[in-house]
Structures are given as C-alpha cells and as structure tokens.
Image (spheres, helix red, strand yellow):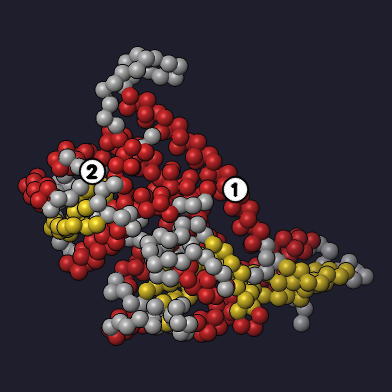
Amino acid sequence: MFDTEITERKIVQRAMIVGVQSPEERDTVISEHLDELAELLNNLGIETTGRQVVRLRTVHPQYHVGSGKAEEIAGLFHEWGCDVLVFDTDLSPSQQRNWERLVKAAVIDRREVILDIFAERATTKEAILQVELARLEYSLPRLTRAWTHLSRQRGGAKGTRGEGEKQIEADRRMVQHRITALKSELEQIRRQRSTMRKNRQRSDVAKAAIVGYTNVGKSSLLNALSGSDVLAEDKLFATLDPSTRRVVLPGNTELIMTDTVGFVRKLPHMLVEAFKSTLEEAAYADFLVVVLDVSSEFLEEHWETTISVLNELDAADKEMIVVFNKSDLEHDQVLEARARGLFPRGLFVSVKSGQGMDQLKSELASMARRHCRTLKVLLPPGRSDLAALAYARGRVYESEYDEEGNLRLIFSIGTNLEERYNSYILN
C-alpha cells in the first residue's frame, strides 16, 4: 500500500537535516546527534547537503519550530538544492503535512529514517514482519501523505460505510486489518521462540546476552568468542535477528551467548515493542555483556541509551560485564580515563587485534560458573517435585534409589534454583 511513497523516497539524493536544541543541551551533543543522523541517511544512500540547528524553548504546533524559522529553513532547503528535509526530532503527522506543503518535498523525521533502515536490513521472516508492523503503525495516522486521490468516492460494499465512503477510510481499514494479521502471525513466532528459549533454560549451561549501542562490535565479539561467522559489518543495524552460539571458555566451561539487535538513541518505541521478542533474550539471560566503544566521545550517552532500552525490558538490574571495545584504536587518553571512571572494573579489549580477549574469556568463565552449580543430593520419597525440577531445569549425570526409597542425584542446575536443595545436599 505504501510502496509508491517508499519508492519515491528511495530515489532522493540530497538531504537537509534539522536539529532542535533545548536550552540545557550542549552544542557538541546536538552536533553529534546530527552526525549520527547523517550516517543513518548515508546508510540509505542519501547525502547530507546542509544542516541547521534550531534553538527552541517552546514547541510550536504548526511546524514544531516558529513560522519565521520555518520560512528560513524552507528558503535554505531550496537554495541548497535538497530534495528531502529530515528532522532529528519527532514530528506529529500534522506537522509533517504542514512542512511538506511548505517545502513541496518529502519531509521525514529520525523515526522514519530508522524504520527505512530496519526495512532494508530485515532478512528473516520474523524481522520482516516486525518491521512491516512498525511501519504500518507509524504510517496509519499519516495515510494522507501516501495518497493523492483522497477525494475519490467508491461504491458501497459489505463492511463499508456505503456509497459515500472516502478512499482514505477504506485505506485505513485495510491497514488496520493488516496490522491485526501481522500481530497474529508474530504471536505464533513468539510462541515458537518461547519454546526454544525454554529448551535452552533446561540446560545446565549459563546464558549471556551481548547488548550495546549499534555498531560497537557485538557481532564481531560473538564471532571471536565462538569461532562462528555471524554477519558483522561496519554499518548501523547490520544484524536485526538474534544469533545464539555455544562458547567454550577456559576450564572447559560452556556458555550460551546471544547477540541482540543494536540500540540507538531515540529508538522508536514502536520498534522496541515490535522487536521485544528479539530483545527479550537479554531479559532471560543469566547475565549481560555490555559492549561500549571506548573510542567514542559520547561513551556516557551510549551507556545511557543502552540502560534506557534495558529498563524497558526490565533487564537493567542484571549482573553485567562491561567491555570497552576498539581499545586498539588511537584515541584521547581522556576518553580512556572517562571510561575507567564510568566502570572501574570494565575490560578493555580489541576484537580486531585480540587484545584483552584472554582476560575477557576468564571473566566470562568465572561468571558462567557462578550461574551454574553441580550438586550431589539425597532426596526423600516425598520430594519428587525436586527430582522433577532437576530433570526439567538442569542436567542429571547420575541417579540411584537406595533401599529406603531415597533418590541420590548428581546434577547441574542454575544458581537461582540451588537453594531449594540446601536441605538435601551431600558432602
């Protein structure tokens, strides 16, 4: 339904980007936000021709900015020969329509840019459906931007309002039906993922999720630890689907590690919701491996973005190993000092050169062992529930009944369940 609009936007080549700065925001922060927006657009093959920063105390309903500033931006837009106007802040549907009437060209915001990138990166069925759902929910209140024939009338049909129904009303109903169908299909996939996750939880092997800002080297880290070949490219959102690998660590300790979709500031809430089944791998992990780019000047902000998304997933209180990647790159010593100040126990590594990887593997092994225990217990006949739990959630190595009907078990299980067996542990 929206293919025409999307196709038209794909052929644009020159963008003017606009940032909105509140009184408390520093110039360097706004500049970095616009740099990132330019990089996002570059991922879509769109060149940034010019940029403007608007200092704003109050949001104006018509254009988000004042009408005088809007006219000034429109003039620069045409003077610079741009064909798409991109805002780093969220615009309401009516504000987008007002801007498009003013500049007579496509006007989008950061959310729409990210949605387009996700649409290009999606490869698996689940990711494709999730992105389509997010885009339809975003586009529903903006349908008038996708059609130029809204005044057309159509004849009545079953389920419509009759001969007077406008095209826009039929379009909206079609979109709502598609949204319902997508949610139903995704729910089936989520149930399948939940079953797979439960199977992993039954294992005695600890589970970790790799999380962090996009393009900090999460997939490369998983590849280095597991010897696998998960797609790892130097671009934003190179991978959208979680990749799970079994990693063998020092002391023959095993760990199941999952690489999750990268975070980004101002990540549209609809995408967090759409990819929740994917991101929930972090919530179900025993601990998290948070990857940060030590060479980034905006290290603290990337950390805050990561924590913000983890809070939405109720996973911010989990144990974490903080990894500062790209430590082989030349960077200001002040950045390293800031990183150490942020996390004194953080590990400095370079996935590319291998620097610090042995220390990271040792730390991962130590953490994995803390989240899994091998127990030797003697269970009385009345505690068949604990025997069943050992088989369901752990790995049983030996089992034997004695003459009194007691069950002697040797098994591994997660530390979160260990205390249930405290009364029956054998020396």
Q: Which residue is at 80% across, 69% downward? A: 379
- Label 1 sits on what residue type? Arg
Q: Position of residue 164 (x, y in %)?
A: 32, 15
Task: Tell me which amino acid carries mark 2.
Answer: Ala
Drawn side of residue 379 relative to residue 107, left or right: right
- Please tell me which residue is depicted at 31% across the width and 18% down the height of the picture: 153
Return the residue at label 1. Answer: 191
Q: Provide residue 123's location: percent of width, then percent of height.
A: 49, 52
Residue at 37% x, 53% y is 117
Q: Is residue 176 left or right of residue 252?
A: left
Please name which of the two marks, 2 or 1, marks the residue nearer to the observer. 2
Q: Which mark is residue 106?
A: 2
**Residue 344 percent across, percent down from the top left:** 39, 83
* Image quarter in which the N terminus is found: top left
Q: Residue at x 31, y 74 (%)?
A: 296
Would you call the spot at circle 1 few (<14 residues within 10 Å), some (14-19), or many (20 or more)? few
Q: CA distance from mark 2 to mark 1?
A: 39 Å
Residue 333 x, y percent position in the rendering: 29, 85
| Element class at badge 2 | strand
